Amino acid sequence: MRMWMLPPGGMCRKHLLGEHVELHMLLGSMRRGKNMDGFLSGGLVDPQLVFARHEELVAEMIRRRFKHTSPIDASECASLAARYAGRTFINIAANAAELQRRCPDCAHLMQAESATAQSDTN
C-alpha cells in the first residue's frame, strides 16, 4: 500500500486508480486492526489523510469522467486514524521522483502539470 500524495492531475490512469484502490485497502486494514508499522515507518501511508486524499482522487476521477461508486465515511476515517496520530510522514518529493522513474506516463503528466502551474504564476 502506498499513498503517493502527488497532485492527481499528474498521475496516469493506472496510478490514479491504483492509489484509490490502495486507500480502500488501507481503510480495510485499519478496520481489521492490522499491524501497519512497516507502512508507517517506511513513510508509505498516513492514516490521518485517508479521507482527504480519497476525496482529492475522486475529484480527479470525476474530472476524467471515470465512474466512482465507492464512497468512504469521513467520521469513520477520523476515528480509525486517531490511533496513528503523530506517527507518520510521507516524503512527497521522494514519491514524485520514484513515480517518475517507474512510469513514463506519470513523468510526462507531472512535467506538463508543472509547466502549467509555472505559466499560471507568471
Image: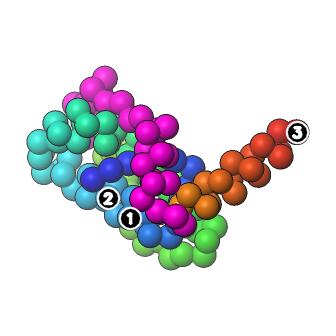
Q: Main secondary structure of the magenta part?
A: helix
Residue annotated with mark 2: 22
39 or 54, which lies in front? Answer: 39
CA gap, disc 2 to disc 1? 6 Å
**Residue 72 seen in this snapshot:** yes
Amino acid type at circle 3 is Asn
Picture disc at residue 71: none
Type of colouring: rainbow
Residue bearing mark 3: 122
What residue does disc 1 label? 18
**Residues drawn in magenta:** 78-105
CA gap between label 3 and label 2 equals 37 Å
Q: Position of residue 116 (x, y in %)?
A: 76, 52
Check disc 1 and report its element: helix, strand or loop: helix
Q: Amino acid at mark 1?
A: Gly
Amino acid marked by disc 2? Glu
In the rendered view, tell whether residue 18 sits above or below residue 90: below
Which mark is nearer the camera, 3 or 2?
A: 3
Classify 10 Å Cα crowding around label 3: few (below 14), some (14-19), many (20 and above): few
Looking at the rendered structure, the number of numbered marks drawn on it comes to 3
